[in-house]
């Protein structure tokens, strides 16, 4: 291929694909760089539920996003751009040839319906009305191919190229043992995903202790590193989504989603074996409402103790037929056993005939564990949880032997922070000025500084991918560049 193009996009997920499609539609020549091979490309877009929320009222959406952000504010121009550009995404996808329908099984209403502005939320759309299963990513691949937009797979972006003024002019790439350069006449768009698969960044920014990840092992913070090297500022680097998980194979960096859907005969115990929270608190994409605010949960390793009733109620981790999402399900093709017995045999679920024996296997004080579970069971008998206020409808005792535990850290879904950007998707330096020729969209620089609702990540990726693609395609070159950098 020609080593000179108008726009270079790094990453082939929702944000990268949207940026490339928009830039191409606006007349720019485009190339996408993707460090993974064809079968593993697409980042978390390919492995996610792949739905986007339907924004039926941009004015209300502005209010809703501010409500979700709370005291962790985001610039007004970013909020305005988000509210305007998340509207009409389904129509845009239909114009590309997609079959779009609302999924009735997930996110039919806002998770944060009590917040001002939630009336903007009109459900979540997906390809064919179905969740996950790579459907969105496969459609985007076909849309790119129909337009002859080149994706270079197995091609890692290693460094941004700049000119003497500091403007980004291209990318250094590595494919196999070969290193070369591709130059961009108008702009480079970072759509490289988050940093949840980078253990050092996870420890430094998220303060998590060796979590397993739910999605793509390729989310290693490449875009963050390259942007910082050319002077980018960062925003909300401590924001994320964690969920209850099952570590599985200790040698595998990815884990399983623990779905507590089938029964309620379980308690959460701390690393010391004490019950510490209301297990029924709604987990809203990494946050629960506790002590008057929305807080990240879970963030600490814990022990989830349950009994034979729970074990026989159904799969602890849903398979591809129920929730076709995540690396272990879609890439590894793991089929969780219907009665959880195979996972007990593997040692992923700890089993014991008594609570005291279970505590010993977990390295906990048996008296503490027995007391914690006994007090919980008393609350079940009374129908009132005086300690933590668990929903009475979920008070089911942990009383039928044998007993079981899933023990380990939370499952990390995604990180949200990255290079700070403005409403045009331009990456900003530490003085708040745009870095000429550099853009970011998607999880590498998510809009969300705090809480988020269902379908927000894909909507954000599409919205600012398109914004970045349009702005880069229209950006002047050479002698006209100075005027084109003005806000």
Image: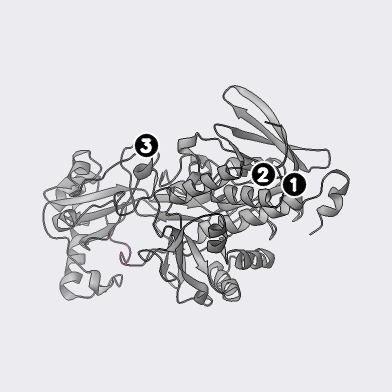
Q: In the structure shown, which secondary structural element does the residue marked by tag 1 occupy?
A: strand
Q: CA gap, disc 2 to disc 3?
A: 29 Å
Q: Which residue occupies the foreground of this view, 103 or 284?
A: 103
**Which one is earlier in the sequence, the residue at label 1 or at label 2?**
2
Q: In the structure shown, which secondary structural element does the residue marked by tag 2 occupy?
A: helix
Mark 2 = which residue?
Answer: 227
Q: Is-magenta flag for residue 277? A: yes
Task: Determine crowd level at label 3: few under 14, some 14-19, many 20+ residues with C-alpha closer than 10 A.
Answer: few
Mark 3 = which residue?
Answer: 252
- The residue under the point 44% across, 63% down is 101
Q: CA gap, disc 1 to disc 2?
A: 12 Å
Against 182, residue 140 (above or below) is below
Task: Determine crowd level at label 1: few under 14, some 14-19, many 20+ residues with C-alpha closer than 10 A.
Answer: many
Q: What x and y, as percent, mark residue 444?
A: 58, 49
**Which one is earlier in the sequence, the residue at label 3 or at label 1?**
3
Q: Are marks 2 and 3 in contact (CB under 8 Å)?
A: no
Task: Determine crowd level at label 2: few under 14, some 14-19, many 20+ residues with C-alpha closer than 10 A.
Answer: many
Q: Which residue occupies the foreground of this view, 247 or 354?
A: 247
């Amino acid at each position: 291929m020609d080593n000179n193009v108008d726009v270079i996009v790094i990453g082939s997920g929702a944000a990268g694909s949207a940026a490339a499609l928009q830039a191409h539609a606006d007349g720019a020549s485009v190339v996408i760089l993707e460090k993974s091979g064809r079968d593993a490309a697409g980042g978390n877009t390919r492995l996610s539920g792949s739905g986007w929320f339907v924004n039926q009222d941009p004015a209300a959406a502005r209010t809703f996003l501010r409500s979700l952000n709370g005291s962790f504010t985001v610039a007004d121009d970013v909020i305005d751009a988000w509210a305007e550009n998340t509207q009409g995404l389904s129509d845009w996808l239909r114009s590309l040839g997609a079959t779009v329908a609302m999924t009735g099984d997930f996110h039919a209403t806002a998770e944060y319906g009590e917040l001002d502005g939630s009336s903007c939320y009109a459900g979540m759309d997906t390809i064919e009305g179905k969740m996950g299963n790579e459907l969105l990513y496969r459609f985007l691949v076909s849309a790119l191919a129909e337009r002859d937009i080149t994706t270079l797979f197995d091609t890692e972006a290693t460094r941004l190229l700049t000119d003497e003024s500091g403007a980004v002019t291209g990318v250094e790439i590595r494919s196999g043992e070969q290193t070369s350069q591709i130059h961009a006449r108008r702009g480079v768009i970072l759509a490289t995903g988050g940093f949840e698969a980078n253990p050092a960044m996870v420890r430094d920014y998220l303060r998590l202790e060796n979590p397993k990840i739910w999605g793509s092992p390729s989310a290693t913070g490449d875009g963050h590193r390259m942007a910082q090297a050319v002077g980018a500022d960062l925003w909300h680097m401590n924001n994320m989504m964690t969920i209850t998980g099952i570590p599985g194979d200790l040698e595998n960096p990815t884990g399983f989603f623990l779905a507590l859907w089938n029964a309620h005969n379980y308690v959460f115990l701390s690393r010391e074996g004490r019950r510490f929270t209301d297990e029924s608190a709604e987990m809203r994409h990494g946050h629960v409402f506790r002590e008057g605010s929305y807080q990240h949960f879970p963030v600490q390793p814990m022990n989830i103790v349950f009994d034979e009733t729970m074990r026989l109620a159904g799969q602890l981790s849903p398979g591809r037929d129920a929730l076709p999402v995540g690396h272990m399900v879609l890439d590894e093709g793991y089929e969780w056993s219907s009665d959880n017995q195979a996972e007990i045999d593997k040692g992923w679920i700890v089993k014991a005939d008594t609570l005291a024996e279970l505590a010993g296997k977990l390295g906990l004080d048996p008296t503490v564990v027995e007391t914690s579970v006994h007090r919980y069971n008393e609350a079940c008998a009374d129908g009132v949880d005086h300690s933590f206020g668990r929903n009475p409808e979920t008070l089911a005792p942990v009383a039928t032997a044998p007993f079981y535990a899933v023990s380990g850290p939370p499952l990390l879904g995604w990180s949200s922070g990255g290079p700070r950007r403005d409403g045009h998707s331009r990456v900003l330096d530490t003085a708040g000025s745009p870095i000429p020729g550099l853009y970011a969209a998607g999880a590498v620089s998510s809009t969300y500084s705090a809480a988020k609702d269902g379908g927000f990540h894909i909507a954000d990726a599409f919205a600012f991918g398109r914004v970045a693609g349009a702005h880069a395609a229209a950006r002047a070159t050479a002698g006209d560049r100075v005027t084109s950098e003005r806000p």
